[in-house]
Image (cartoon, rainbow, N blue to C red):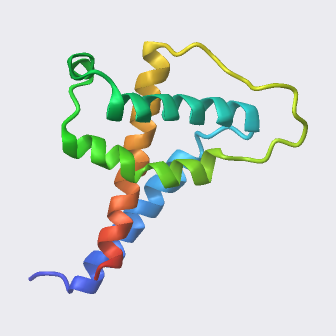
Amino acid sequence: MSKPINDIYTELIAIAEAELNRISKTIPDDPAICFVMLLEMTRMYDYLHFGPDDELKEYRLSFQQVDVLKSGWNVAISFLFKPITHFTGIPAIESSEETRKSAISMLYQFGCIALLKRTAEMG
């Protein structure tokens, strides 16, 4: 017997909320660290959209996967863009393979959550 469609939408939202809760536990409280994470996501987001095609092949992301990353942008900002109470300079780190992959992974996870919610809201 198949589930009523409303139950499926409710399940999608529950899955999205559970994932959001899981990811939010990994986000640091320190606004400076969040800024650095957001900065690396911005670097990768721009690179994946405007970087040279031959260099982008190393990430092996399809157009659809990049589109999911794009969907995660607003969710990422809502979690990582925190007020800085005292300004002591712009925190920055050198971009590395590890930080780039971490940024892509988090953006992708946020994108999946956004797509799940959007799908459920269409019902």
Q: Nearer the viewer, residue 5 or 103?
A: 103
Q: Nearer the viewer, residue 23 or 115?
A: 115
Establish if 122 lies above or below 37: below
User: Percent from the top left, x then y, of residue 13?
Assistant: 39, 70
Query: Is there any visible trace of residue 30 in the rendered image?
Result: no
Seen at 49% across and 21% down, the residue is: 99
Query: Is there any visible trace of residue 64 in the rendered image?
Result: yes
Relative side of 53 to 50, left or right = left
**Residue at the farthest left position:** 1
Relative side of 28 to 116, left or right = right
The quarter holding residue 2 reads: bottom left
Establish if 36 lies above or below 54: below
Relative side of 36 to 3, left or right = right
Number of callouts in the render? 0
Q: Nearer the viewer, residue 81 or 19?
A: 81
Q: Where, quadrant-wise, is the C terminus in this rendering?
A: bottom left
